[in-house]
Amino acid sequence: MITHLELTGVAALLGGYFVWNLGMYLVALLRAMKWRERARLSAQLQPRIRQELVSFLAGSENHEAIREFIRKSRLDVADALLSFQATVAGSARDRLCALTIEHELIHDWCTETRSKDPIIRRTAFARLAFACSYEPCRRVAGELLRQALNDPDTEVRFYAWRALVQSGTIEEIEKLFEASLSQSLLIRILLTEELRRFAISLCERAAIWALQSPESKRVLAALEILVAWERAVPIPDLGQLLSHGDRRIRIQALRLARLVPLERHDLRGIGRMVVSDDPEASVEAARTLGAVRFEGALPELAHAMRSGNALLARTAAEAMAEIPGKGWATLEELSAGGDLMAASAAAEALHRVRRKAEV
């Protein structure tokens, strides 16, 4: 039988559980009310703050309105400032960044970078990445950005990289490029766009040194960045990479070859790769030959169309279609031949290129 004491204990436990649930509900309710109030205030302030910032960028020296908005909500002013990061540059961007110093917003962000909450830290570094394109802001941030390069949080590391890239000298950019080669693929992908505008300068020294590294991982990482830039870059001696012992490097070098001036002997080497035992390398070689329109590789491309590999046959046909004259003539011959796969690929490529020429 259940004693009175036991019933009292169960009742107490149930009561405690009810009180705990009620307390959690009230906390959640208060948080929701606070969030709604915060959202309502932001909806009211954001358009007005942005309008005032537009006036400021247009030359207005009346800072009192901005000060008033900062007194009401520093967070909304910070958000409004960052909403301009994709639309302003040069002196206009510097004027916005100067506001972060004048109103000590940047000091808030520096403090928030030490938060244990990863969301707060990411937001703080994202804001610093915007502001630190302005040298005085960079000085306020000090060593915070460099220390964050080793942060365990990927997003924090990216924003630190971004801030340093935006405000560094070419010597610093070179060091960042070299350091990025040992970072994760995600970081390199995110940094590619940030480094793109320095492509020519980086290819004068830093990229060349990276491609000459004895470490295959660094060479591969550098090639991936150069290929992702999709810009014509001056890379000498690409032929050494085209014959590298690591097939991943050979394939990336083939992709880069479409963007680099090549010697005739390099083009001949790419032609030989079309008929290699590596299907992926063969396809990339065929694409490269089509991109550079190298007439001297037509025999290898024709051989590739009869290889029995459907993807390679189509790619080789497309490459020949990029070479008017002899390339088109070769496709006509193949389209009338006995190899069904080669004939189909040739006819399809000819049809497409002729329709394009008519347009």
Image (spheres, grey):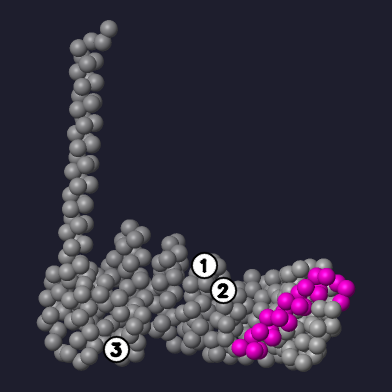
Q: Residue at x 33, y 58 (%)?
A: 117
Circle 2 residue: 181
Q: Secondary structure at mark 3?
A: helix
Q: Nearer the viewer, residue 7 or 282?
A: 282
Residue 23 at x, y = what percent? 19, 40
Circle 1 residue: 186
Tell whether 179 sits left or right of 7.
right
Marks 3 and 2: in contact by CB < 8 Å? no
Query: Does the rendering let one see residue 238?
Result: no
Give the number of the disc on residue 92: 3
Q: Residue at x 60, y 75 (%)?
A: 224
Q: Which residues are magenta?
A: 337-359
Query: Which amino acid is tagged 3?
Result: Ala
Residue 298 at x, y = what percent? 81, 85
Tell whether 168 sits left or right of 232.
left
Q: Quadrant of residue 139?
A: bottom left
Query: Does the rendering let one see residue 12?
Result: yes
Q: Earlier in the sequence, mark 2 or mark 1?
A: 2
